[in-house]
Image (cartoon, rainbow, N blue to C red):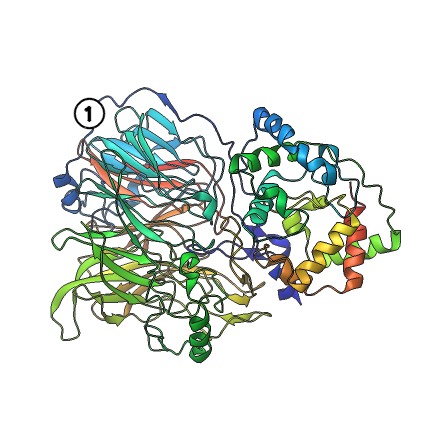
């Protein structure tokens, strides 16, 4: 949300930023769940084998981030560096919701499933854009959410689609008819819980985290039975005991975080009951290591964002990479990037599972995460330990100055670095490619008691500094060296997904509507098309009848207040 | 200074999808509101300046305040006994009812000089970024246009001294910058609005 007269902008994701008293666009609630239109003219069903092997084929796009490892890499090369300049729109699909769009369409056998803000789902022909059905979720009377009424897509398994909703439900739809099969309440929306992430389905378990780190939730990842929505297990991102951690002095990069640990310990001895409102949202899909039956995800900021006196200790497992058991939901290991975060420079972008070089140069199973700090972190999958972190992809300044009442300047601003934007990994170059933003901010602290769950609880404010230039940067980082190999700067901060392909391309969008293809080896821009509204969703690629397509939602973005629209553009070669 | 002013805007986007109150909710609320009349007046137009006018208030604000009273985040000895036994449904209905009522004049005789000073102060501290133009309120931010002078003064002082703390820190932050004279002027200004 921008208020031009005071130059305040946007919400911080996993995070919210200053601003935004202005009433958001709201949709009338209380309508019946409705499915309009006909049926998909074929049977749609996706097996576990297909889901497990999704990264090795180019026909379908079956997961938000391409496969369980979340590479956001498309293995087809029909569209490539040599011919991308001929890429043209094949069709444009317009939804009825003109609002922030973050969806990653799922494509199965030529059928595309896409979502919009306020939890609409459409089934369309992925070749022509013809609409088959349109589902509108019946929203409950209370929703409480940060950063826009977004939805980042459905998951598919068998003949069912799964979606999390703003009123914190999980719904299952019949993929052929769009009819509601079941719905289940994940958590209480009056306590600040909401869902915008796409679920991940594996072995008939629907995995989903939660938003709410700006409202004093107790975060979690839950698993539900795909057949009936029954809860199978819950992993709380805030443990009842032990959330004080090890009283870490330095962050993951070895910088002192200026904590007054003696004062924190004294406060902790008096009261440690705040774990119930300590935050720790999980905003993006987990990665799944099926061989080791392990689920990997990152956990967002503690609540309240800026006011740390309320919550002494390391605030585990906020701002951490966490691994849990797929079948039982039990803890395996974690690595905390920032203990006792008071800047909301948390962990949001989904982790990617790849093999990496360890410190001795040996290839081992690894996991990487792009941080709001602007570093790519490379970990050992055996125990979560940090192998290396990349050079900073964007300017850092004055880290870790503590927030003050008057405001302390520090870079990066609270949106990052890398926000929720999922990275891509290009196996050919061994580069992780990340969308970064640069927004100079001051950090302000204000004492604030827990306000009950339905009111934004930042304990201060993040403020964009008037007159200071903001911009974006696509950065390619070699995961084995941590060096930035190339960068491509943009006029506006970047938020949304990217897509690397075997055609040597990297697709991403900008808030000004520009959807681009870069040469993934050099970062050179090869192609661009303006969608007319913010290109801030997550691009995907697929093949129907021998022809490769690239799809991108262009509906703008609430958080950075990029121009809203309602279209999904689908491109192919002439 | 500028940063101070900006601090107040750390308010919510929390779009409580402002529950579309149905006619049934309003009618159910009318019955349940009978207990409220003694203090808050017929249809929520309180005749006593110590008790807030509820008519035309945003339903989300009303609901959240009732909930805060019930759960102890806001206390007022005269109010507390009334909320103890309210169900969630009751609170929704009451909120829907009072939000749907038309506010009438509070009959406050404002001092024009104080009104002018209050407006200047309001512009300076950016009240309308949250309370919106005309102080009509939105979502969980209350309407304060035409509210009783006495009630407004008491609330601002309570925020300033930390007696009232269910604002997530936003009013606490801004009220710390206000003198008693500022509060007096601001209350003249908003009480005088339609």
Question: Camera-side residue: A216 or B78?
Answer: B78
Left or right of residue B73: residue B142: right
Compared across the picture, whether A191 is left or right of B122 comes to: left
In this picture, is A65 found above or below A378? above
Residue B99, picture quadrant:
top right
Q: Which residue is mark 1?
A: A43
Point out residue B82 in the picture as x, y percentages from the top left corner: 63, 42
Question: Which is more toward the observer, A54 or A438?
Answer: A54
Q: Residue at x 32, y 36 (%)?
A: A570
Give residue A371's quadrant in the image.
bottom left
Please give left or right for residue A486 compared with residue B22 in the image. left
Compared to B41, does B125 lie above or below? below
- The subunit letter for the residue under badge 1 reads A
A471 relative to B82, above or below: below
Q: What's the residue at 59%, 69% (across, down)?
A: A405
Q: Looking at the picture, does residue B135 appear above or below residue A227?
A: below
x, y percent for residue A165: 39, 39
Q: In front here: A284 or A556? A: A284
Residue A521 in view here: no
Q: Quadrant of the C terminus of chain A?
A: top left
Residue B128 at least partly seen: yes
Q: How many marks?
A: 1
Q: At which x and y percent is residue B24?
A: 57, 24
x then y, percent, for residue A208: 30, 46
Which residue appears farthest toward the top when viewing the image? A38
- Secondary-structure class at tag 1: loop
Q: Alpha-carbon neighbours of circle 1 within 10 Å: few (<14), some, or many (≥20)?
A: few
């Amino acid at each position: 949300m921008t208020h031009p007269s005071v130059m305040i902008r946007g919400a911080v994701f996993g995070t919210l930023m200053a601003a935004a008293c202005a009433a958001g666009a709201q949709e009338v609630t209380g309508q019946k769940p409705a499915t309009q239109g006909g049926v998909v003219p074929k049977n749609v069903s996706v097996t576990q084998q297909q889901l497990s092997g999704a990264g090795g084929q180019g026909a379908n796009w079956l997961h938000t981030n391409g496969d369980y490892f979340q590479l956001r890499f498309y293995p087809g090369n029909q569209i490539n560096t040599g011919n991308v300049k001929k890429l043209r729109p094949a069709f444009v699909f317009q939804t009825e919701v003109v609002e922030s769009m973050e969806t990653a369409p799922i494509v199965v056998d030529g059928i595309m499933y896409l979502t919009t803000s306020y939890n609409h789902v459409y089934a369309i022909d992925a070749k022509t854009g013809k609409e088959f059905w349109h589902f509108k979720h019946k929203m409950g009377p209370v929703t409480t959410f940060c950063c826009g009424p977004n939805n980042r897509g459905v998951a598919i398994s068998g003949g069912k689609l799964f979606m999390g909703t703003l009123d914190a439900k999980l719904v299952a739809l019949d993929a052929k008819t769009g009819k509601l099969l079941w719905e289940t309440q994940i958590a209480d929306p009056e306590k600040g819980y909401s869902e915008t992430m796409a679920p991940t389905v594996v072995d008939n378990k629907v995995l989903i985290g939660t938003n709410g780190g700006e409202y004093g939730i107790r975060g979690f990842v839950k698993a539900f039975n795909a057949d009936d929505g029954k809860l199978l297990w819950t992993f709380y991102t805030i443990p009842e005991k032990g959330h004080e951690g090890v009283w870490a002095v330095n962050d993951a990069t070895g910088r002192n975080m200026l904590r007054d640990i003696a004062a924190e310990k004294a406060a902790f001895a008096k009261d440690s009951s705040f774990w119930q409102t300590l935050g720790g949202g999980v905003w993006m899909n987990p990665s799944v290591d099926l061989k080791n039956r392990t689920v990997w995800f990152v956990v967002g900021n503690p609540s309240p964002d800026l006011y740390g006196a309320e919550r002494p200790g390391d605030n585990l497992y906020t701002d951490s990479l966490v691994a849990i058991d797929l079948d039982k939901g039990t803890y395996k290991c974690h690595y905390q990037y920032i203990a006792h975060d008071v800047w909301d420079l948390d962990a949001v972008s989904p982790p990617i599972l790849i093999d990496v070089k360890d410190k001795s140069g040996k290839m081992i199973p690894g996991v990487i995460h792009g941080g709001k700090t602007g570093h790519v972190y490379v970990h050992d999958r055996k125990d979560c330990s940090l192998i290396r972190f990349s050079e900073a992809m964007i300017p850092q300044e004055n880290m870790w100055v503590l927030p003050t009442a008057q405001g302390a300047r520090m870079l990066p601003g609270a949106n990052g670095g890398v926000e929720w934007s999922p990275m891509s990994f290009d196996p050919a170059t061994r580069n992780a490619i990340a969308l970064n933003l640069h927004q100079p901010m001051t950090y302000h602290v204000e004492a604030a008691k827990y306000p009950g769950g339905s009111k934004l609880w930042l304990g201060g404010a993040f403020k964009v500094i008037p007159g200071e230039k903001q911009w974006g940067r696509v950065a390619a980082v070699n995961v084995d060296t941590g060096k930035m190999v190339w960068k491509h700067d943009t006029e506006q901060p970047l938020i949304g997904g990217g897509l690397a392909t075997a055609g040597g391309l990297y697709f991403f969008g900008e808030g000004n509507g520009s959807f681009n293809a870069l040469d993934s080896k050099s970062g050179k821009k090869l192609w661009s098309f303006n969608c007319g509204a913010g290109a801030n969703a997550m691009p995907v690629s697929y093949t129907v009848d021998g022809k490769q397509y690239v799809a991108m939602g262009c509906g703008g973005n609430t958080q950075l207040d990029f121009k809203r629209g309602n279209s999904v553009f689908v491109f192919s070669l002439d | 200074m500028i940063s101070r002013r900006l601090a107040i805007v750390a308010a919510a986007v929390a779009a409580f999808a402002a529950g579309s109150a149905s006619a049934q909710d309003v009618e159910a609320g009318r019955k349940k509101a009978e207990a409220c009349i003694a203090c808050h007046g017929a249809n929520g137009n309180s005749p006593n300046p110590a008790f807030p006018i509820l008519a035309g208030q945003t339903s989300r604000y009303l609901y959240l305040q009732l909930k805060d009273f019930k759960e102890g985040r806001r206390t007022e000895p005269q109010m507390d006994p009334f909320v103890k036994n309210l169900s969630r449904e009751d609170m929704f209905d009451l909120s829907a009812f009072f939000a749907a009522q038309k506010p009438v004049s509070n009959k406050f005789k404002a001092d024009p000089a104080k009104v002018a000073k209050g407006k200047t102060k309001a512009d300076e501290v950016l009240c309308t970024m949250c309370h919106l133009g005309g102080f009509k309120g939105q979502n969980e931010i209350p309407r304060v246009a035409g509210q009783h002078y006495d009630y407004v003064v008491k609330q601002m002082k309570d925020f300033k001294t930390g007696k009232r703390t269910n604002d997530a820190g936003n009013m606490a932050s801004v009220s710390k910058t206000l003198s008693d004279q500022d509060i007096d002027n601001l209350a003249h200004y908003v009480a005088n609005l339609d």
